[in-house]
Image (spheres, helix red, strand yellow):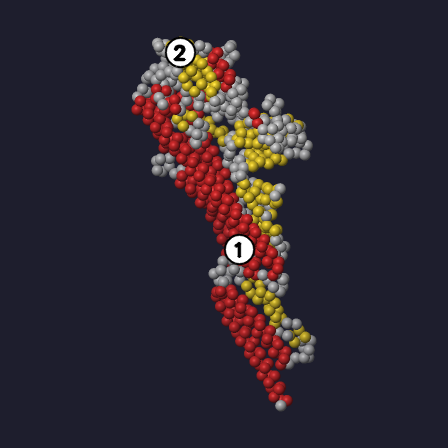
Amino acid sequence: MSFGANSILDMGRWALFASQVQLQVTGENIANVNTEGYSRRSVLLEEGPYIDYSPGQLGTGVKATEVVRHFDEMVEAMYLGQSALSDMWGNLFEQLKGVENLLNESSGTGVSDALSQYFNSWNEVSQRPDNYGARQTVLNDAATLISTLKQVDNDLSLMQQRVNKEISAQVDEANTLMQEIADLNNQIQVHQVDGQNNANALFDERARKLRSLAELMDIRTIDNGGGNLTVLTEAGQTLVDGESAFSLEFRAATKTKDLRTDSTFDGNVYFDGSDDFEYTIEFVASNAGDPVGQVGSGAGAAQFRVSLDGGVTWLANEDGSERHFSARGYDDRVNVEGLQIWFGSDTDSQGSGTGTFVDGDRFIISPHQGLYWVQNTSHAEEITPQTHFNGEANPQRLTGGSLTALMTFRDSYVGKYRSKLGELAESVIWETNRRHSQGAGLQAFTETEGTYRVDYIDKALASDSAGLAFGDRLQSGSSFMYVYNESTGLLASSAALDFDGNGMIFNPDIHTLEDVRDAFDRTFNGAINATIVNNQLRLEAEEGYTFAFGTDSAGLYAALGLNTFFKGSAPNTMAINEKVSGDLDYLATGHVNGAGEMNTGDNTTALSMYALREEDVTTSTAFEGTTKQSILDYYNGIVGNVGTDVNRAQFNANFYGTLAKDLDERQQQISGVNLDEEMSDLIKYQASYTAAAKLITTADQMLQTVLSLKS
């Protein structure tokens, strides 16, 4: 190769081209200074090859090899993780503020005020037991309490329904993003030629999509180069694999089974009802590995335990011992918290499952809409966020992003608030009815009907299969009744219910509704006629008689809804017993004294109702266990929990938001466009371009000089 004017001309041409590319890229940076997700670009220059020559090695100029984007993949990976947590806590904070506003007691019209008015009305009627105005006030304040509890529960329910719509929309958005990322992977594969042609705009677009996806859910990426990018959840479910995209589904209630290899059970679990928690059912044996048993109606049926937080904690009895349930068929369905659970064949819920369970056989019931990762038409895995009762998130599910926030808010927060509100309503109902059912009004009964029904009249009232709302609160004890001569008002007889003809008291683990009916007929034969109508007990006085209720250490009258003030067992079913609201004489303010008398001025029951304001009562939830405190303190605890949750969410939103912002700023320091720097580069590249042009002009003049010599 010879050197001279031609080589200088060639060198100038390449220098001119390099400066032109640099000016082009700089102009692109300046033009996109405000474009979201744009990464600053620059041109890599490379010296031309050297040629050994005399008087020494001479260069051939410069070569613009490729246009590169400035982007830190490690910082971005860290940002995606912190962004998901920031969006989760930020979204959760916004949602929880709505609950805080709902339970705001400053207006004087909240649950706490309604409870106080309700208890105070009993104090007022205790001072004037025979005054119908005071009696009506009790009913009015009770109605206000009921409507307030219902309104709060309904508003919380509406929040859950609204959240479900948001979740559905965000699932669609996530699926769209995953498909777009897969499409971008495909385009990058086509356009990317490492070291020669970088698909910078496509890489920027993919990074923007990844950030949008991270706002919805926690993700991590594995970049194998070019368009071969894999996107996974933090738990490991693949969302995008190169050019392939998977999908998410927001499905209705469902169930799954996980049987041990040595299990011979052939069938499935079934349920009826809905709940905000996921039920994990696990069969247990006295010795690990031993067969557990089969589905059956007797005492030898297989036993299982239930967890509402993924198997971290298990439902317990009041004494703290683990609570076990029997595996039953359809006709003996077991009531577990908010669900009826039974076992049938794979194809028929009312069929018979066969085979034997072994220790560790598991079934999972998701009685609400949940989020599922769909691998193919035959495999879907639940990834609904789950918070254990110890406060830790299940790492096998989603743990970040707005989807996690919405579903956690729906289940772990609103679900708990509604559960505690339900326990509050249940406690008010039970404690009121417990006292009222042993009291007396201004007149005796000629007939009454229990407000609580059972599913099966031939099953022990405290059994899980009986279906009695307050069956778990029953205990062994005596239930007294008084019978009067209707014309004279004198006591005709009084006795405790006799369950075997020899004075046997009530035993909730043995006696059924049929047994209770028979006990009434046996004890008060000829005076009271007991029948079962629509699985509820009905009592009618025979002609010439009336009756009143007395001391009931078993809680039988309250559990069956006899002589009770409230009916229902939850905020949405709570109501005043029509027997009382239809006739104020049946509002029990007094009691039947030791002589069997009902006195109009007696205020014993009314005073005990007012004392309930400060009295500690037993409350129990799956996530808090059993506690003892007053009803007012229990509700104040709910309000306090909401406040604590709001503060925690706000703190975490600020904390993770700060971390995400810091990482974003670090990324912007690398990939962001600085106009001052770009303007400086513009001047520098313009000078380079001018110099290169001058070089070409000089080479041209050299050639002209040489040509003029020949002429």
Identify the mark nearer the N-term, 1 or 2: 1
Residue 604 visible from this viewpoint: no
Which of the image's four quarters has the N terminus?
bottom right
Q: Mark 1 against mark 2, which lies toward the viewer?
A: 2
Residue at disc 1, secondary structure: helix
Question: What residue is at 40 percent from the left and 24 percent from the top?
Answer: 577
The answer to whether residue 421 is left or right of residue 670 is left
Q: Give coordinates of residue 275: x percent, y percent.
A: 51, 34
The image shows residue 216, relative to residue 434, as above or below, that is: below
Q: Quadrant of the C terminus?
A: bottom right
The residue to which callout 2 is attached is 543
Residue on which the image places disc 1 = 208
Q: Position of residue 549 (x, y in %)?
A: 41, 16
Is residue 705 shown above or below 353? below
Q: Is residue 321 left or right of residue 548?
A: right
Q: How many marks?
A: 2
Q: Residue at x 46, y 33 (%)?
A: 420
Q: Which mark is residue 43?
A: none
Q: Residue 19, image x and y in percent?
A: 56, 71
Residue at x 49% of width, y 58% of height: 36
Please tell me how crowded label 2 is: few (under 14), some (14-19), or many (20+) other residues with Cα within 10 Å.
few
The CA span between labels 1 and 2 is 84 Å
Residue type (three-letter) at the residue carrying disc 2: Glu
Q: Are marks 1 and 2 in contact (CB under 8 Å)?
A: no
- Whether residue 261 is situated above or below residue 497 in the rendered picture: below
Report whether residue 568 is seen: yes
* Residue at (47% x, 28% y) in the render: 619
Q: Looking at numbered disc 1 in the image, what kind of residue is underneath it?
A: Arg
